[in-house]
């Protein structure tokens, strides 16, 4: 039968499809099987069955599908089977088989009649259909798909029971051929209330030896996010994707409906989906519906006692209504005597159906009930919500502030920010005498606190907006200390969004507003912030002077966290910087001071600088303990979304990328994006580089989407690297040069000069420029070759000027002051310090310079093996992929010089690395070079059985069964990455370009 054409892509469900494919394989071998596929409405049962049916059809299996339909109490007998028989009757190929079983024709045309109502008639009909299916399976493997069994009529259920218990699943007697038949039947698990007629049949069927049950669980969040992005042609903001993922809760249909409604009014359930959800609610009794309406106001989960008090129902009536709602699977009973909606969207639909007055009244009831239980901190957020929705702003403001205090204590900055913004929204609506009183409870100080929470939650632009609002609020206030605090907080937040000149201006104003004598903690924090801002605009002299002046004052006043922060700045400014032994000693001292002061952001800044110092020194393994310590500290403090932990998570991914742990890097990046969607370029960067190196479709588009919105320094850096390299891999020299230069220009603005990443960008663009020059020279176009050679000279000069310049990079220490700790009167300096692509004159920067110089020589028509050998050695600090790419160029240069054996060795080493990494384009490039230069026996030549190792033969057999790399790994007790390496070796030895071709070659050559 033709399959349904779905508009949305098939995403996820790899394990489920693999399990069903295994069932089909058993059936093809003569072992009839049945699978009952269960899942909630919309979870994707039809999509899975359609995918499996399509796979079966392509393999030569006859696929027949029958659908059950909800016709209420008046069902049509045998409806799914009459649909199947109608398809068979319409296809002339099946006429002889149908003719051999005339009894089944009673279900065709005439509909249900008395001929099949007696017991003997039913038995003959059942046996006839079983015989028909058996005969069909003799001609070709047969897949019978029955959808929506929860709507099946009694006759269809009886026929299915017969087929699976006494019919086609049983092995024929007397040595007759086995039935090559698979039955896949789906049903909605959430529709099966206790008295549903399908329940006893399912319990009976799953006990049969040839029947198994497959439950489709909700999709993983990562798969839902992929689905949402695939459904929309335009890039959706990460916050939108995350909200859809949260609301869909793994249900593919809900995700599609919510995505389609992204342009509609925010917050509501799409009308079509709401109608679908409310149909089931309206089937309940009036009392049960009222229970659901009241519960929807309480939230996703409600305590039994709270619901009883809000309903004012007798206990027995409430319990009867709850039993009804639970039986219909709209509510589920939970731990601690609570009830929850089975799906959040069902609650939203019920809540949206309430009348405005009814909604406000119920919210007021819950607010009063919660308040009557005492002002517990853990209920403050609930109380605030209910008071706000019941239109009591004064009580809502007080409870919101209490909730913000609780969120701060438990380390939840995003929640603290949300509650503080509610306080600020409600502030004008509440009379002064009804506002909470106390230290720090004033509009401007609340704005400062909210900006700190935003910075800690990773909402840098929101932090800037809140601090600007505080600046307007403070105006020309005579309190110079408060004015200074607002300005240096704004300066720190502006550094976080790369508005460096403005940051320097505000930090200068802050320092000028408050006198250095008498010394004060506020002056110390203003000075610490000014040190960071001065560095961003390249004024290292001012930064060093102010830091040296402020450090003894911080020590004398015992402003320990500020002292630690100034020590960190001095460690990066003086002597050999953070990668020197002296710098690391100072950083460890700063870490200890910040830890003693209980100041997590400054402690994390010290740990980050210790890690990045190791990275810049080329000591990659030494980075890992510092990163582990820093991220653990961030987890304990609830600050994983704040700037320093983002940098540390990025550096961790960068290390995995450089060290060749690519699969681990991709998994970690996906986890980071799922947990912290706002991490953007930080989580995407190394993963993008890997996907690009592996030739995966869509990598370039994802890089372009990074720079589609407002300017973000990190996004521009990541996109610049990925898009420049992508253009170079395509052989588009003009595009590569344009991307590199535009990225350098954007990243240089306000930074006092080109950033360190300019070396890498220049080297990547040089690869394409050199290719273009070589091609022009081979074509006899000397003018074009000279033009590209001149471009190569300019790019190489840029790389050399950045890599070998005096002093440190202007973006080397990009600090971001965040929250100000009122206990010491100063601030909490968080940071986003650029790791980019290596510090100036560090091993990585010098390695990219070596590559740039070698590419420049190639562009000039002078391929220099010694320059490429130097580049290979330079990347030995840890970047395995770039070292392999340089080895390919080294092999080319050696081949041009007639040094064939050395060229072959370089090519072999490059290929081994590329295969281990799964960098298919690089493998192909090496193979072309090997064949062209006849360096060794070309890897595309086929090997005999002896050419495969014992392990590779095991992998090949599993490959022929359609196993994925992960499944091969699980079977052979090896990692998926190791399995991938074995598969790559097999493809190379068999001369195959795909897994399917490898299996075909193996069958042809008798290797299986």
Image (spheres, grey):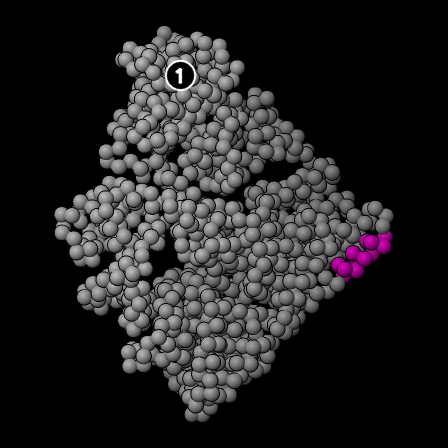
913 is higher (above) or lower (below) than 757: above
**Picture quadrant of residue 208:** top left
Give the magenta part as a residue range. Answer: 782-793
Q: Is residue 138 visible?
A: yes
Q: Residue at x 56, y 64 (%)?
A: 710
| In-image side of 29 versus 495 (left or right) | left
Q: Main secondary structure of the magenta part?
A: helix
Q: Is residue 305 visible?
A: no
Q: Which residue is mark 1?
A: 110
Determine the residue located farthest toward the bottom in the rendered image.
517
| In-image side of 564 versus 696 (left or right) | left
Q: Position of residue 154 (x, y in %)?
A: 30, 24
Q: Residue at x 56, y 52 (%)?
A: 234
**Picture quadrant of residue 810:** bottom right
| In-image side of 457 versus 123 (left or right) | right
Determine the residue located farthest toward the top in the rendered image.
174
Q: Residue at x 32, y 51 (%)?
A: 350
Label 1, secondary structure: give it: loop
Question: Looking at this view, is 902 or 836 the one in front?
Answer: 836
Question: Looking at this view, is 11 or 408 the one in front?
Answer: 11
Question: Looking at this view, is 105 or 622 the one in front?
Answer: 105
599 is higher (above) or lower (below) than 720: below
Q: Residue at x 47, y 23 (%)?
A: 63
**Picture quadrant of residue 356:** bottom left
């Amino acid at each position: 039968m033709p399959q349904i054409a779905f508009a949305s892509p098939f995403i996820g469900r790899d394990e489920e499809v693999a399990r069903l494919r295994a069932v089909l394989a058993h059936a093809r071998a003569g072992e009839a099987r049945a699978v009952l596929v269960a899942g909630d409405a919309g979870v994707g049962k039809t999509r899975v069955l359609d995918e499996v049916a399509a796979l079966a059809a392509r393999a030569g299996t006859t696929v027949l599908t029958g659908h059950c339909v909800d016709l209420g109490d008046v069902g049509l007998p045998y409806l799914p089977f009459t649909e199947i028989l109608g398809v068979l009757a319409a296809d002339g190929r099946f006429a002889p088989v149908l003719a051999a079983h005339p009894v089944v024709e009673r279900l065709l045309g005439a509909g249900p009649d008395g001929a099949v109502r007696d017991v003997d008639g039913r038995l003959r009909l059942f046996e006839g259909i079983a015989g028909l299916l058996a005969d069909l399976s003799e001609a070709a493997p047969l897949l019978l798909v029955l959808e929506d069994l929860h709507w099946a009529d009694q006759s269809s259920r009886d026929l299915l029971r017969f087929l699976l218990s006494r019919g086609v699943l049983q092995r024929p007697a007397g040595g007759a051929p086995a039935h090559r038949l698979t039955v896949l039947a789906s049903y909605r698990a959430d529709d099966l209330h206790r008295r549903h007629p399908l329940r006893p049949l399912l319990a009976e069927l799953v006990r049969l030896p040839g029947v198994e049950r497959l439950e489709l669980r909700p999709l993983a969040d990562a798969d839902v996010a992929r689905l949402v992005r695939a459904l929309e042609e335009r890039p959706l903001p990460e916050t939108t994707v995350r909200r859809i993922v949260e609301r869909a809760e793994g249900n593919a249909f809900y995700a599609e409906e919510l995505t389609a409604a992204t342009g509609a009014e925010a917050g509501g359930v799409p009308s079509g989906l709401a109608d679908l959800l409310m149909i089931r609610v309206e089937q309940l009794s009036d009392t049960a519906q009222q229970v659901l309406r009241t519960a929807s106001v309480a939230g996703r989960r409600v305590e039994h006692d709270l619901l009883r008090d809000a309903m004012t129902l007798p206990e027995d009536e409430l319990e009867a209504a709850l039993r009804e709602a639970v039986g219909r699977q709209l509510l589920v009973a939970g731990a601690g005597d609570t009830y929850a909606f089975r799906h959040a969207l069902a609650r939203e639909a019920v809540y949206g159906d309430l009348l405005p007055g009814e909604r406000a009244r119920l919210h007021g009831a819950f607010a009063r009930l919660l308040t009557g239980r005492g002002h517990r901190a853990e209920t403050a957020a609930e109380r605030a919500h209910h008071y706000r929705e019941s239109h009591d702003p004064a009580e809502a403001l007080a409870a919101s502030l209490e909730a913000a205090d609780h969120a701060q204590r438990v380390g939840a900055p995003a929640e603290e920010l949300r509650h503080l913004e509610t306080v600020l929204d409600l502030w004008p609506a509440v009379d002064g005498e009804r506002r909470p009183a106390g230290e720090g409870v004033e509009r401007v100080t609340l704005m400062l606190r909210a900006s700190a929470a935003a910075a800690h939650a990773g909402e840098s632009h929101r932090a800037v907006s809140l601090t600007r609002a505080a600046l307007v609020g403070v105006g020309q206030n005579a309190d110079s200390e408060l004015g200074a605090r607002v300005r240096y907080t704004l300066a720190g937040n502006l550094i976080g969004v790369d508005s460096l000149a403005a940051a320097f201006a505000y930090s200068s104003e802050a320092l000028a507003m408050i006198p250095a004598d008498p010394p004060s903690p506020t002056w110390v924090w203003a000075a610490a912030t000014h040190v960071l801002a001065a560095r961003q605009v390249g004024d290292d002299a001012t930064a060093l002077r102010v830091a040296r002046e402020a450090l003894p004052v911080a020590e004398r006043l015992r402003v320990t966290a500020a002292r630690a922060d100034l020590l960190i700045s001095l460690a990066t400014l003086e002597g050999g910087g953070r990668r020197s032994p002296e710098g690391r000693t100072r950083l460890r001292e700063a870490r200890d001071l910040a830890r003693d002061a209980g100041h997590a952001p400054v402690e994390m800044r010290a740990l980050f600088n210790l890690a990045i110092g190791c990275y810049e020194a080329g000591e990659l393994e030494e980075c890992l303990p510092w990163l582990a310590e820093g991220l653990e500290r961030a987890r304990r403090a609830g600050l994983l979304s704040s700037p320093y932990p983002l940098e540390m998570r990025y550096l961790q991914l960068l290390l995995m990328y450089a060290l060749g742990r690519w699969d681990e890097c991709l998994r970690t990046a996906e986890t980071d994006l799922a947990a912290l969607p706002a991490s953007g370029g930080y989580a995407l960067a190394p993963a993008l580089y890997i996907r690009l190196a592996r030739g995966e479709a869509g990598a370039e588009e994802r890089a372009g989407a990074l720079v589609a919105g407002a300017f973000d320094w990190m996004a521009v850096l990541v996109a610049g690297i990925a898009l420049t390299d992508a253009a170079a891999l395509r052989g588009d020299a003009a595009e590569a040069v344009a991307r590199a230069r535009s990225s350098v220009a954007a990243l240089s603005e306000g930074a006092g000069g080109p950033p360190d990443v300019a070396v890498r960008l220049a080297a990547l663009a040089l690869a394409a420029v050199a290719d273009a020059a070589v091609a022009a020279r081979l074509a006899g176009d000397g003018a074009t070759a000279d033009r590209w050679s001149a471009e190569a000279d300019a790019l190489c000069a840029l790389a050399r000027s950045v890599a070998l310049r005096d002093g440190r990079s202007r973006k080397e220490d990009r600090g971001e002051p965040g929250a100000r700790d009122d206990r010491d009167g100063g601030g909490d300096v968080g940071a986003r310090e650029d790791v980019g692509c290596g510090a100036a004159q560090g091993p990585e920067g010098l390695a990219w310079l070596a590559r740039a110089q070698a590419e420049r020589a190639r562009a000039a028509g002078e391929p220099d093996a010694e320059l490429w050998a130097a580049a290979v050695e330079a990347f030995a600090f840890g970047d395995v992929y770039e070292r392999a790419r340089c080895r390919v160029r080294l092999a080319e240069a050696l081949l041009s010089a007639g040094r064939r054996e050395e060229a072959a060795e370089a090519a072999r080493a490059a290929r081994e690395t590329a295969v281990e990494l799964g960098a298919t384009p690089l493998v192909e490039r090496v193979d072309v070079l090997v064949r062209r230069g006849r360096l060794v026996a070309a890897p595309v030549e086929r090997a005999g059985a002896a050419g495969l190792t014992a392990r590779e033969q095991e992998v090949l057999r599993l490959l022929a069964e359609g196993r994925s790399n992960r499944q091969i790994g699980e079977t052979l007790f090896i990692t998926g990455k190791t399995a991938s390496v074995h598969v790559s070796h097999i493809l190379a030895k068999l001369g195959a370009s795909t897994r399917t071709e490898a299996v075909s070659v193996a069958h042809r050559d008798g290797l299986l």
